[in-house]
């Protein structure tokens, strides 16, 4: 840094020395039009910027030699400026791609750690129109992610997965949910504990390799804890003795991408919803007859902020504004239901 400053100082001194010499030798000639230091300064500026108005020019041999110096210098100055500008733009683009300027996402999902499992999850979240911020410690992941997923919905941050200071660039304090997707369960637990220190209100979801640690993770502050092995084993067993049920379950677990696909979706009931303050029996009958959509549950928020899921509730249970209806529908009905509910699918935090 000191060497760069010294070089700059020497260049400035050389520049003004040449200006002084040019004005001195030119002002003594009878046909000179560069008669003072300001004339020499103006001549150097229009020469160095390649504008060349022609209103000032040297007439003495020494002045013409100095003009050659300024002309050659102009090429160097322009090359230097263009080079630095290119470097600056490249660096800005690089830092933007690496996520160092942060994201404006709110109520989004933050995924810490990238692999094939996270890739599959992001594909489903994208289908649902969910914003996602991905934190990865592999630079090569960034290009792969942006090549497959739209930047309007996906933000990437390159960071050490243990460096929590950079996590705010991914909007972690404004996230609706944080998915911890690290290599082993110990790393996942430590990550939750560390993030909880700075962001105590955060909600976490984690998929465990060892289901015996479920209670440990709940005690550490995880909101939702799943076991990969348990899910796979249950689905596998179902395929063995109830293959049709397994096929339907697998279909319902996957976000629908085609009109004939079926999916379980969740929509918030607003005060303007025609089914608000109706009984579940009325909702069930109305949704089935009008849209061929099946209501299978209600999610109600309790006083302590926890959610209570009522599976196939009794017909006389009231559906209130603020509740969420759990529905089974085909892909061709989704737009009609969105129009009816006047809200996007999923839980709003």
Image (cartoon, rainbow, N blue to C red):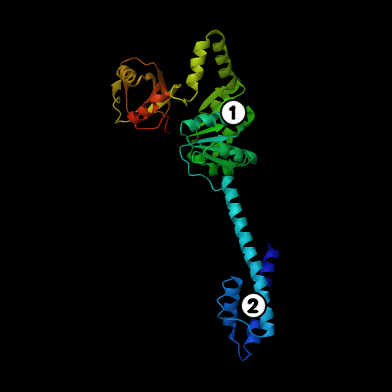
What mark, if any, has residue 349 been given in the picture? none
- Which quadrant would residue 312 be assigned to in this image? top left
Decide: marks 2, 1 in contact (CB < 8 A)?
A: no
The residue carrying pointer 1 sits among few (fewer than 14), some (14 to 19) or many (20 or more) residues within 10 Å by Cα, namely few
Q: Indicate the position of residue 320 as horizontal and vertical percent values.
A: 32, 25
**Above-or-below relation of 39 to 185:** below
| Residue that carries the numbered disc 1 in the rendered image | 117
**Residue 160 shown left or right of residue 288 in the figure:** right
> Horizontal and vertical percent for residue 186?
63, 29
Tell me the CA gap for discs 2 and 1.
64 Å
- The residue beneath circle 2 is 16
- Give the mark nearer the N terminus: 2 vs 1: 2
Residue 134, above or below 285: below
Q: Is residue 308 left or right of residue 57?
A: left
Looking at the rendered structure, the secondary structure element under dot 1 is: helix
Label 2 crowding class (10 Å Cα cut-off): few <14, some 14-19, many 20+?
Answer: some
| Farthest residue, direction bottom | 30
Which residue occupies 58% across, 15% down?
Answer: 233
Q: Position of residue 328 (x, y in %)?
A: 41, 20
């Amino acid at each position: 840094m000191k060497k760069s400053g010294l070089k700059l100082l020497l260049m400035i001194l050389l520049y003004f020395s040449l200006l002084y010499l040019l004005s001195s030798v030119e002002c003594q000639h009878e046909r000179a039009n560069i008669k003072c230091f300001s004339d020499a300064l103006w001549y150097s500026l229009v020469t160095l910027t390649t504008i060349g108005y022609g209103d000032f020019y040297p007439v003495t041999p020494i002045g013409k030699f100095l003009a050659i110096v300024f002309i050659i210098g102009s090429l160097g100055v322009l090359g230097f400026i263009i080079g630095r500008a290119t470097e600056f733009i490249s660096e800005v683009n690089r830092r933007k791609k690496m996520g160092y300027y942060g994201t404006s996402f709110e109520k989004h999902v933050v995924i810490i750690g990238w692999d094939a499992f996270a890739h599959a999850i992001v594909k489903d979240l994208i289908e649902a129109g969910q914003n996602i911020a991905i934190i990865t410690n592999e630079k090569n992941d960034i290009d792969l992610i942006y090549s497959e997923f739209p930047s309007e919905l996906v933000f990437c941050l390159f960071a050490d997965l243990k460096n929590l200071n950079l996590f705010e660039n991914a909007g972690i304090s404004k996230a609706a949910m944080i998915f911890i997707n690290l290599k082993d369960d110990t790393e996942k637990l430590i990550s939750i504990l560390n993030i909880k220190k700075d962001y105590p209100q955060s909600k976490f979801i984690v998929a465990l390799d060892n289901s015996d640690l479920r209670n440990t993770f709940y005690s550490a502050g995880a909101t939702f804890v799943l076991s990969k092995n348990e899910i796979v084993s249950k689905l596998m067993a179902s395929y063995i003795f109830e293959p049709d049920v397994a096929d339907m379950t697998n279909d319902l677990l996957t976000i629908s991408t085609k009109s004939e696909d079926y999916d379980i979706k969740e929509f918030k009931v607003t005060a303007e919803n025609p089914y608000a303050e109706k009984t579940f029996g009325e909702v069930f009958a109305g949704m089935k007859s009008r849209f061929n959509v099946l209501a299978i549950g209600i999610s109600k928020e309790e006083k302590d902020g926890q959610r209570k899921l009522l599976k196939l509730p009794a017909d006389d249970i009231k559906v209130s504004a603020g509740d969420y209806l759990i529905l089974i529908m085909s892909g061709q009905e989704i737009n009609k239901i969105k129009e009816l509910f006047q809200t996007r699918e999923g839980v709003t935090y």
